[in-house]
Image: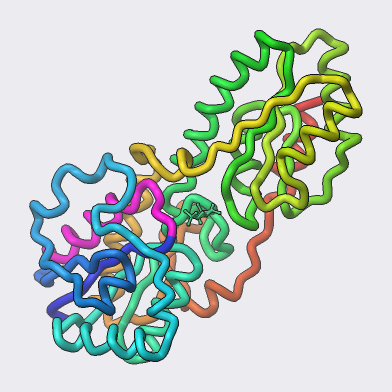
Amino acid sequence: MKKIGVLTSGGDSPGMNAAIRAVVRAGIYNGLKVVGIKRGYEGLINGDIEEMKLSSVADIIHRGGTMLRTARSEAFKTEEGFKKALNVIKIFGIEGIVVIGGDGSLKGAERLSQAGIPTIGLPGTIDNDLAYTDYTIGFDTAINTVLHAISNIRDTSTSHGRANIVEVMGRHCGDIALYAGLAGGAESIIVPEEEFSIDEVCKRLIQGKNRGKLHSIIILAEGASKNSYAIAKEIEEKTGIEVRITILGHIQRGGSPTAFDRILASQMGSKAVDLLIQGKKSRAVGIKGNEICDFDILEALSMKKKMNKDLYALTKILSI
Ligand code: F6P
């Protein structure tokens, strides 16, 4: 193998730059040429590709976002777009690709491997919704961002004696809500994976108020069955406590990656290069019990994500 490419695809996540840096530097260290493919699969279709040097990835390990930019490519899913991409890969002499992104991006990586282009996937998403890996690149930074927001909201919540709903991202996965909620001492955590009752949320608010608690934080995952406004209205009607809503949105996707995300991304990027050099294809790199590991992409994507029920139960015990 002489030349490999690297791309980031789907929603960006903090740590993607650290992963790109690791792929480029480990690739060059091992005597490979490395090219950067811009805007994910869109760049592959349009030939938006440039050679990466050691200096191309200098000064990026601490930056959020992705220097290669990203896109959710609809064109790549079509036969025409996919054929164009294969043609561009041939023209540029790319013999292996590292794809950094979420489940949709890994599906694209699998398709490329099926078409004869050895492709390795790295889990780059804040959602932590990929079952084959304990952690995805960007999740740790995102929960720390949420934690910071909770602290600020708690201050004003206390001053006014209000309850605050903090809505977080995660698509269908409640991990951001669960982990940030536990770390932030939230009174209630509402996730898509578990049924919840407004009455229980209200009971916790009233119990807290009765023993002199001035603030109350309810963390709501965006994929939950009810939205912030409906929940706030019901709580106000049932308890008479004033509720405010903060939807954190894309603030969770930005910012300088934590040490954990930088280290994870660096290890995974280097592992991807090793796998390509070993002649592997269609592998998804992950971390299980502190060990960097890899699975067949189809197998990885077929695993069903399970919420950590013990952690969820613990949040209920600790927020009485
Ligand atoms: O997958 C990452 C994520 O941030 C989800 O948590 C969220 O639902 C979605 O992307 C938002 O996507 P977009 O940035 O395209 O609006």
Number of marks present in the image shown: 0
Q: Residue at x 22, y 83 (%)?
A: 89
Task: Identify the residue shown where x is 28% and y is 51%.
Answer: 17
Q: Is residue 68 above or below residue 92?
A: above
Specify how the rendered protein is coloured.
Answer: rainbow
Residue 7: x and y, percent?
29, 66
Expressed as whole percent of the image width and height from the top left, the position of residue 160 reads 69, 11
Q: Give the left or right position of residue 55, taking residue 39 as reference.
A: left
What residue lies at 48% left-to-right and 41% top-to-bottom? 252
Question: 220 or 240: which is nearer to us?
Answer: 240
> Residue 15 location in percent, x, y?
35, 48
Query: Which quadrant would residue 8 be assigned to in this image?
Result: bottom left
Measured from the top left, where is residue 34 in percent x and y? 15, 69
The N terminus appears in which quarter of the rendering?
bottom left
| Majority secondary structure of magenta residues | helix
Q: Is residue 168 above or below residue 277?
A: above
Q: Which residues are magenta?
A: 11-29
The one nearer the camera, 29 or 249, is 249
Does residue 140 show up?
Answer: no
Of residues 181 and 251, the one nearer the viewer is 251
Q: Is residue 233 visible?
A: yes
Judge whether residue 24 is colored magenta: yes
